[in-house]
Image (cartoon, rainbow, N blue to C red):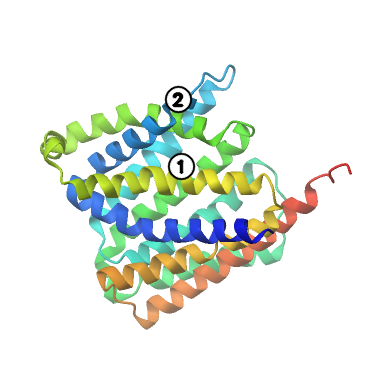
Amino acid sequence: MKPLHLFMILAIDVVWGFNVVAVKEGVMSAGPMVAVLLRYTVSTLVCLPFIRWLPGRMGLVLLTGFIAGALFMSLGGLSFALADNLSALSIVGQLGVPFSLILAVIFMKEEIRWPRIIAIAICFLGVVVMGFDPAIAHERVGILLTAGASLCWAIGNLLFRHLKGVPVLVIHGWLGIVSIPIMLALAALFEPAKLAAIPDLPLSTWGWVAYSGIMSSIVGHGGMTWLFQRYPVAVVSPLTLPTPLISVMVAVAVYETPITGQMLVGGLLTLVGVTIITIRTAQRRDSDMPAEPL
């Protein structure tokens, strides 16, 4: 891998790692539903020139937009609004990896052997260990919401695989078009005062929302898609593993999030499981790909 591209991956890891602050600040200032609404508004405006109709695939696009867009982001926004321990949320958010594998086995008939089966069990064991930590017992609703958001993310990944070949800016544009009216309705129903206060939001809130919508969603996911088009999955995927560690360090540094011994054990178990799944899945997908002609 070229040094510039390696730097690009590590930069994306940092962007995603710092996104926990952007999401938390946006949610606390604007409200979870309004913050997601504004995030999609910003990202859709950026993607607007690239949006195009996709004949024969619009049903799938709309379903993907609902699950991987509005549902995923609304659950995530609520979890950040209800929980204070962002380190726990960052780790539980990694359940999207085992969820993706489970769904691939069920619906895509992907073959799975014992190392990845054990890794899935380790991931969920780690979350259970954290969930029973008395120090974060009050965070359980937020943790469950994050787990639900991770499942939506995994379902979205499965749907994205059927949209192969569609440019990332087109996909993100449609995610916004689908999600904006849903989030507007939810904000009007549950956060009418926050919705009415949008014109009075401080500039800093718009900055956090723009960071999430542009840097995390478009630059991060768009850049990663570009890299996957140029390098084997087994090369790129493991290099994204520092993201949850960066998120935890950022959460501790910015919000002084406490980390107990039980939480540390649970977090390490989950991350070990995620690492095994990520590396072995990437290697398998590369081995299943036909060799390119010379």
* Crowd rating for badge 2 (residues with CA inside 10 Å; few <14, some 14–19, many 20+): few
Quadrant of the rendered image containing residue 159 = top right
Tell us which disc is closer to us: 2 or 1: 2
Task: Check disc 2 and report the residue beneath it.
Answer: 49
Pick whichever, 82 or 167, lies toward us.
167
Q: Quadrant of the N terminus?
A: bottom right
Query: Looking at numbered disc 1 in the image, what kind of residue is underneath it?
Result: Ile
Q: Are marks 2 and 1 in contact (CB under 8 Å)?
A: no
Identity of the residue furthest to the right in this view: 294
Most foreground residue, 245 or 84: 245
Query: Can you say which quadrant of the picture contains the C terminus?
Result: top right
Asked which secondary structure carries label 2, the reply is: helix
The residue lying at 26 percent from left, 69 percent from top is 255
Query: What residue sits 51% from the left and 46% below the top?
Result: 221
The spot of residue 18 in percent (x, y) is: 37, 60
Label 1: which secondary element: helix
Q: Vertical placement of 60 versus 37: above or below?
A: above
- Where is residue 217 drawn, in percent x and y? 44, 44
**Which amino acid, mark 2?**
Pro
Image position, residue 42 (x, y; %):
33, 36
Residue shown at the point (32%, 33%) measured from the top left: 41
Q: Percent position (x, y) of residue 258?
A: 29, 76
Q: Quadrant of residue 257?
A: bottom left
Q: Which of the pair 288/225 is nearer the observer?
A: 225
Identify the residue at the far front of this view. 4
Q: Earlier in the sequence, mark 2 or mark 1?
A: 2
Mark 1 — residue? 218
Label 1 environment density (alpha carbons within 10 Å; few <14, some 14–19, many ≥20): many
Horizontally, is 232 left or right of 14 in the view? right
Gap in angstroms between the C-alphas marked 2 and 1: 14 Å
